[in-house]
Image (spheres, helix red, strand yellow):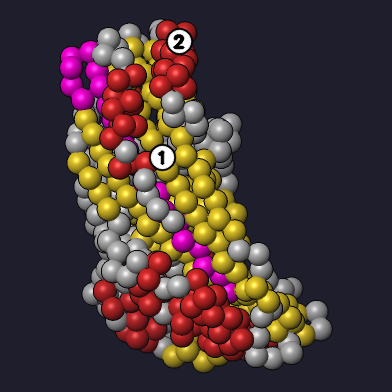
Amino acid sequence: MTDLLIESTVLEDRLRSVLPADVDYASARLVDERTEHLSVRRNELEPVFNEFDTGVMISIWNRGGLGYAATTDLSRTGLTAAVEQARSWAGITAGAMVTTAAPPSHASGAYASPVEVTWDAMPLHDRLELLHQQSRLLGIDDRIVDWGASLVRREVDQLLITASRGGDGGRIEQRFRFVYPSLRATANEATNTQTRTFGGHAYCGQGGAEVLGRFGFGDAASQIAEQALELLTAPNCPTGVMDALLAPDQMILQIHESIGHPLELDRILGDERNYAGTSFVKPEMFGSYQYGSELLNVTFDPTVPGQLASYGFDDDGTPAERQHLIENGILVRGLGGAVSQERSGLPGVANSRAQNWNRPPIDRMANLNVEPGESTVDELISSIEHGVYLHTNNSWSIDDSRNKFQFGCEYGQLIENGEIVRAVRNPGYRGISSTFWRSLSGVANRDSFTVMGTPNCGKGELNQEIGTGHASPACKFSDIEVFGGES
């Protein structure tokens, strides 16, 4: 795989030459993406395949209108046609927009994913042998009926060029390198089937081959297989009101669904109501609403090295910086880019993001993290008289206002009198976002703080699937409605 397009001065000059200088704001966003998929299932190599995708999105804001046009034709003729189409749509929508403010930034700069070991430094043969090795470690027992190991690496190069009537212009070059490792073991005995995975596909991030070592990919398969077998004889999770200790790989789903989506400003403004619902959060809540206990501190931080959604600039060109969304439990800031901030009059962040060249940017989560506390995990466990330690999400359900939720997990551990006593299967819990976070009664320290991600968050019409980063330590919640998945 090579990255050539954003290094092409001919193509860059062509993009600059077609952008109009007689409009309020114009941008050309070139995206060049390459992806490799490797997978071994039940010790058999599945077909290796690669994907390549390249195109340009033209955006034009002018006299109160906005127009988009995307194209894979990178010739001068193709780009000119896209510009004219976007200009036409800007004229048609003039006077009919909910906002007339174009993105204010004409920033220039660059970002590159930190890479310690380039992916190509590991030959294809070695990558496949690693997967075969992990597959053999997963399929250790006749009761394990299905298993697999996979690796996906993705390279995305972006070039954003902006221009305006005032002569201002910017240039932002960003190079992203992603690695998505995966392990899975499914065990069966009679009518009981249990699956354990490698963090529910959450152990992914930016970087090179070192991402595998960062998450312990080479050492995880045996434990995953053993726990899948352990769940076959484990009792069903008890049902009742008790303490819940959420492991980091479950916390990321809790953060994503009941903090991330509710705080998206475009959702709060009603843009998502036809597709994925609105939000229980109202504009007047910012600055005063007690979202969680005083232990809850949540940051939007696209500057974390190696996290899945780190970047230097969002897709409107706004420079990215770390911001508190919730501070000591108080809601202080929403997840909205420059346009949504202008519409709502609320503070936001640099999170206007697009799935690819053929989608316009919208408000999306990036790296959304619960900051570490001061307790050790052992201290949190010892403080629980009766509860369950919940690991790895495997099901989720949440209402259209991102308020009432019910989540299921792969693996549970029963805690009695401050000690883990046994594994339990089919654990789940439910709650209401607007009160759940106020039950936060313990936050582990940085020793358990794990940087992870969600690679396939969907939002928008037309749908956009995008990666979001989440990091968290283990967290304790008091008096939670816990249940088992069997009657």
Residue type at mark 1: give it.
Val
Q: Is residue 121 visible in the rendered structure shown here?
A: yes
Q: Residue 381, labelled with which disc?
A: none
Residue at screen point 60% across, 54% down: 397
Q: Give the overall secondary structure of the magenta segment.
A: strand
118 within the magenta span: no
Which residue position is annotated with label 1?
31
Q: Does residue 129 sit above or below 2 in this rendering?
A: below
Q: Is residue 24 visible in the rendered structure shown here?
A: no
Highlighted range, magenta: 149-169
Residue at screen point 56% across, 70% down: 150
- The spot of residue 379 in percent (x, y) is 32, 84
| Residue nearest the viewer, comparing 359 with 174 | 174
- The spot of residue 304 in percent (x, y) is 26, 59
- Left-right relation of 115 to 280: left
Please name which of the two marks, 1 or 2, marks the residue nearer to the observer: 1
Which residue position is annotated with label 2?
88
| Residue nearest the viewer, comparing 115 with 100 | 115
Q: Does residue 81 sit above or below 28 in this rendering?
A: above
Quarter of image, res 210: bottom left
> Quarter holding the N terminus?
bottom left
